[in-house]
Image: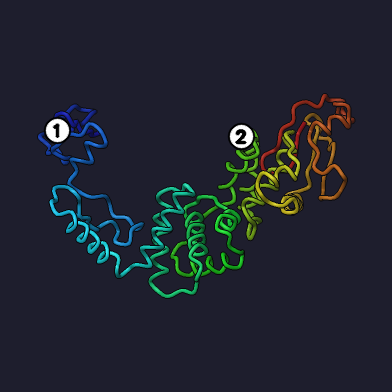
Amino acid sequence: MIIFDAERGEYIDTETGEVIEDRVVDQGPEWRAYDNQDRTERERTGPWLTLKFHDEGLSTRIGNNRVKDKIKLIKMQKLQNTIRVSKDRKLVTYLQMLNSEASKLDLPGHVKETAAFILRKLFAKPFLIKDPYALLAAVLYYSCEVNNVPTRLQEFKVRYTITSHELWKALRVVKEAAEFKSRIKPTECIPKVIGKLNLPPAIGAKVVELIDLMYKNGLTGGKSCISLTAGAVYVISALMDVKKNQSEIAYSLNVTVETVRNRYREIVKMLGPIRYVCKSCGYELHRFEKVGQDVYGVRTPTEIKLIYDGKCPRCGHELGESSLIPGKLEVVM
């Protein structure tokens, strides 16, 4: 293994101790900086190129230092700013709004860069979207999808007070102009849902297994990741004895109870039936085949134990701690 000794300027083979090359020229700056302010003052280069500015950060600014005629300085600054933005005035306005809204949403830097790139692609040809906030909402939402940052359309609709028709129309225009494909998986939103409901991490792990199984079998297409996760959380929390009711899940995630119930019904239909089995003899203690089978819904292991007084009716085995079999809706007790 070859390492570089920065103090001596040498490349050394760690196995033999041989100095392969010495007196290597230091490629770094010739000055030293002890804090961020010192580094900023000594640097002679500007920031890196970025698409978040209309000129990609290559513009120059007239400073205020060492100038006697202040009036002439102000006129020069105004003239320079006018020349800088005269050609792309509309793009400058939209990029400023984009950076401001992305900062308010606390989106990471790579999402902002993607959004700025998409916005530039849109301005390369005329488009028929009059509401700037509908366009920005669509661009930011699609950028989050491309970069695997889970978000919800409902959040953007409420934040910018736009209708579903306006947002979908803008999103269609954005998808036609962009060169990316959405890569977000339904499992991306699970940590956010588990955190909002204050559930233990073990339930999150089981929900990931369940949704990943559905995703691999092509059962998640056309469904919102939040609603799908809500239905999966309802089922898994019940099977792991930390049951959350549907209204509580719906309120926490800002979805309707009908949405949670529909996703939960689909999960039971696709991957069911839900079985409760004795660990000792394999006797089926209870089977839940479809939603509406009884008024209790998905039962918890504790409820099953209470039905049989804590013992298997076939072998008399003491029904102990329950465990969920991976890849199945089956509880062993």
The reply, left or right, for residue 42 in relation to residue 176 is left
Q: Position of residue 301 (x, y in %)?
A: 79, 33
- Judge whether 82 appears above or below 207 on screen: below
Looking at the image, tell me whether mark 1 or mark 2 is earlier in sequence order. 1
Residue in view at x 26 percent, y 50 percent: 47
Q: Closest to the observer: 165 or 273? A: 165
Residue receiving disc 2: 201
Q: Which mark is residue 213?
A: none
Residue 9, which numbered label? 1
**Count of residue discs:** 2
Based on the displayed image, in which of its 4 quarters is residue 11 positioned? top left
Tell me the amino acid under the disc marked 2. Pro
Q: Quadrant of the N terminus?
A: top left
Secondary structure of residue under mark 1: loop
Q: Quadrant of residue 249?
A: top right
Instruction: Check disc 2 and report its element: helix, strand or loop.
Output: helix
Q: Quadrant of the C terminus?
A: top right
Task: Name above or below for residue 87 compared with residue 95.
Answer: below
